[in-house]
Image: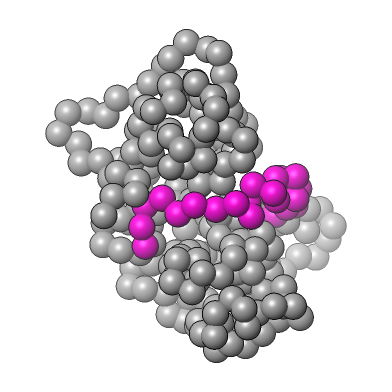
Amino acid sequence: MQVYWGLKEAGPWSLKGLNSHENAYENDSPAPPNMSAADDLRFQHWFNHNYRFIPTYMNMAQINLKKEKNGYLYSLLSCMSASTHASLCDWAEFNSDNEADEIFHLMRQWKTWASKNITYLKDRIDIFGQPCRKGGIDGTVHIIGDEGFIFVFNPHTDAHWGSIPLTDMIGLNKGSKFELFEISSGIPKPVGVYAKGDNFIFEIAPKSAMLLELKPTEKQLNKTAAPEGIKIQQAFSK
């Protein structure tokens, strides 16, 4: 059972017994200027989470195969960052099973991944502030027991640098060293080994998304340093 969007104004207590709620507006009608449907989705869910205190698992996420300007994967990653379930918002026609497999294999792959990691997706911390703000990247952290996942999004037309503290601010309490992998391609790519208390510094390309996996490790430190003079956006900054 779902609920009309207006009911969430009464707060999370009014949503008892419902599995999700409508967004404030129909997704992407319109999205903020120069933003996409997925950017609008994260923009709305940030307010649900931080202003209305609605649990992440009650957000209604919408997958766009064709309407998403930044690509199908960008839409899927935005949905997984924002909620624990999603609905297909637009459609791609097909005439055979082979065509259907080609169209939907990415969705099936990430549905399997999300089902396996749904406990992490329920546990969300917003790290860079309101999505769609001028020049700002955004993202969420999902850490349990000193391991988990980090989503980062850059909705703008230029590359940006970000910094995330590997501390108890994101749920790291016991481990001393951590390895990070970029996994949004489906093939884990090592991106560094950091000590607890370090800042994980990274660059994110224009109009793109990153999904990182974080695990405890005993490997030697291997950190990324930003070039001199680069402006770095700090997580949790005012």
Q: Which image quadrant is residue 18 in?
A: bottom right
Residue 196 x, y percent position in the rendering: 44, 26
Q: Is residue 196 above or below residue 137?
A: above
- In front: 4, or 109? 4
* Rendered-image quadrant of the C terminus: bottom left
Residue, x 51% and y 40% (percent of image)? 171
Q: Is residue 84 above or below residue 175?
A: below
User: What residue is shown at x 75% (from left), y 50% (from top)?
Assistant: 115
* Location of residue 103 in the rendering, given as x and y in whole percent from the top left corner: 70, 56
Q: Is residue 154 above or below residue 6?
A: above
Decide if residue 211 is in sight here.
Answer: no
User: Which region is colored magenta?
Assistant: 107-130
Q: Residue furthest right?
A: 97
Q: Main secondary structure of the magenta part?
A: helix
Residue at image position (36%, 57%) is: 129
Give percent across and percent down for residue 201. 35, 33
Residue 73 locus on image (x, y percent): 57, 52
Residue lying at the far left of the rendered structure: 229
